Amino acid sequence: MHQYSFFTFDYSKPEPAQSIDALTRSLADYLPPLQVNQIKRAYYYAEQAHEGQNRRSGEPYVTHPLAVAGILSNMRMDAQSLMAAMLHDVIEDTAINKPDLSDQFGEVVAELVDGVSKLTRIEFQSKAEQQAENFQKMALAMAKDIRVILVKLADRLHNMRTLGVLPPPKRRRIARETLEIYAPIAQRLGMHTLRVEFEDLGFQAMHPMRAARIRKAIKNRFGDRKKTIEAIRQNIENCLDEEGHTAQVVGREKHLYSIYNKMRNKRKSLREILDLYAFRIVVDSVDTCYRVLGCVHSLYKPVPGQFKDYIAIPKANGYQSLHTVLFGMEGVPIEIQIRTHEMEEMANNGIAAHWLYKSSEQEPRGNSSHARARQWVQGLLEMQQRAGDSLEFIENVKIDLFPDEVYVFTPRGDIMELPAGATAVDFAYAVHSDIGNSCVACRINRRLAPLSEPLQSGQTVEVITTPGAQPNPAWLNFVVTAKARSGIRHFLKHQRKTEAVELGKRMLERALASMETSLDEFEPHHLDQLVEVLHTKSIESLLEQIGMGNRVAYLTARQLLNLRDERHQDDENALPAAQSRQAMVIHGTEGFLVNFARCCYPIPGDHIVGIVSSEKGVVVHCESCHNSIELRNEPERVVPLTWADDIDRDFSVELKVELSKQRGIIAVLATRVNGADASIEKISVEDENPKISTIHLVIGVRSRVHLASIMRRIRNIPAVIKVEREKH
């Protein structure tokens, strides 16, 4: 069993090197000879690749990958992981590339090595403390095969063990990175042994004086701790023997970094730290765990409120155990952890515990990382089912550990967290609403890409903005974040309001012009009085209502005039004919609040009239349209309109074409329309009889002159009998 004590490291000299022969002897305990030979071949390949390269300590560089493989062998990792450990710096530091490794050692090993290299390359582009947690998540999300992370953790552990040769500033920087990033990753993956060593090595390197003082203070307060631990352990063993329980009792001391963190974060003195002594009791079944709990509670008094059952409710990383705190000898608090052998293995090595295959499974079906991952997940399922409780661990630690999140870099190296499926538009709004509103294009990893392209973890995203640009309503079809969706909708709603206010002002000005006055001739108090009389919030709100068609411009103008001149009150309801009013000019670019009727499809050159409609603003009709004629008896809703001279856009118009049925005639018709520089927006066919077809075309034209040209081209088709502009 594992037994923990304080880590005391000598940074003055590097860790003694392990030989390849010693490693292969230890591997032979759990791997077949064929796989051991493959690992040995990977070592000699790495030795040749790194020839001439030395570490800071002066040793040949290959001693580092050898040590990393040694760390993984202590976790009893599989052969592919160990081969990747031997080769993990080959792509980064030598001329050998990924295809070379794939040819020599297989695609899986090459993918593992490439994954480790990618993590090394993105490492710490941003060293801001607040980015540490996001980097942890990004590292996990980028590693499709979780063994990439395990190799990287072992690589970092060996670097931490050999920090002594580095200058103090670099030593502190690496220690900080380890404490902020790698120790939490080990914790997330349930690898307690690795996390403890990371934390104590990092603490010793970051704060050597604090580590020494805490160690000395503990020794002064509790004297020879080993004797105390042994005495308590003996008492627990005797109690369990009397009750007939077979168990292993292991005493451990709380590691230094944990004590330091509790003192700092909870502002407690050393005397107040509860669990300075801790014992682990390892038994053979879950049922025995609870029986042993009863024994230790009868031996020492439990501390109220300090019992936790992580067997019934496992932690998110799969950790399971019973925890209780007791009043020990001389009042020293003791933490007891009770667990099964499987839980102990899981607690110490986390997911690494599931990479060792039984002798009958040395070559699993399918050599891909996914096949291995499935076996790993199956192992976790079995562990959870034995405990008879939730599958929370499966939800938290998957083969792609963060399937619902992506982590991307800004051009400055900051990390942004976004939901899966997020696009550059989501990214832009996550940075700032103004960036989202004005974005027009994006670069992903320095290449121009569509704004709708889903982002992947590890990409660098740059948003290109243009002053005056506006969100496109089509973005709502692909954005996934609430911030982007609400930002786009808010802008469009605001834009609609702005257009309504502008249109309302123009309509009121036109109505006032027909009365031979203008808005500028009224005093502010006249406008305030009008707002009060009409029970609206402000003059802007009043103009918006006019533009939206909820209030008639001419009536409003009349009321404003009457407020200014009491003499005209008797004429308040007198409404001159619409023709007496000055016409409003239509440019075709007014936006949401000027709409073109689909019943008559008005185009430049037609005589037009506007009908005020609630929520639609002004709807433009042809003067001859039956809908506009019917509304002439409501003159307050009629707005005289005229076309601007410089219109440069297409307007929809409907044509009805009768023609003889012929093979390919619709294609000929479409070609003629396109040849006249017009676009077909809609086409439908109705058959009147076996020989004649009637085709309805909605096409985009610039003016009546353009339309006449198109109709001429259509008439010139021999099969065409009749072509006319459709009016409903």
Image (cartoon, rainbow, N blue to C red):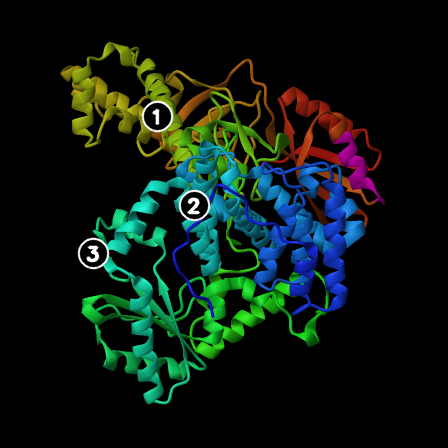
Quadrant where the C terminus is found in the figure: top right
For marks 2 and 3, the one nearer the N-term is 2
Examine the structure image and report whether residue 640 is included in the region drawn in magenta: no
**Discs 1, 2 touching: Cβ within 8 Å:** no
Q: Give the amino acid type for the residue marked by disc 3 in the picture.
A: Arg
Q: Dot 1: what SS? A: helix
Hey, what amino acid is under mark 2?
Gly
Percent x, y of residue 615: 38, 37
309 or 651, which lies in front?
309
Question: Residue at point 71% right, 53% down?
Answer: 109
Residue wearing tag 2: 202
Callout 2 touching callout 3 (CB < 8 Å): no
SS assignment for the magenta stretch, majority: helix
Front tag of 3 and 1: 3
| 67 lies above or below 460 | below
Label 1 to label 2, Cα distance in Å?
A: 64 Å
**689 sits left or right of 62 in the view:** right
Whether residue 273 sits left or right of residue 278 in the image: it is left
Q: Which residue is mark 3?
A: 271
Residue 179 seen in the figure? yes
Circle 1 packing at 10 Å, graded few (<14), some (14-19), many (20+), is many
Residue 667 among those drawn in magenta: yes
Disc 3 secondary structure class: helix
Would you identify the image quadrant in which residue 511 lies?
A: top left
Vertical relation: 505 (above or below) 386: above
Q: Residue at horizontal 75%, vertical 42%?
A: 49
State the extent of the magenta-drawn residues as a range: 662-673
Of residue 701 and residue 77, the one placed in the foreground of this image is: 77
Instruction: Indicate which disc residue 501 carries.
Output: 1
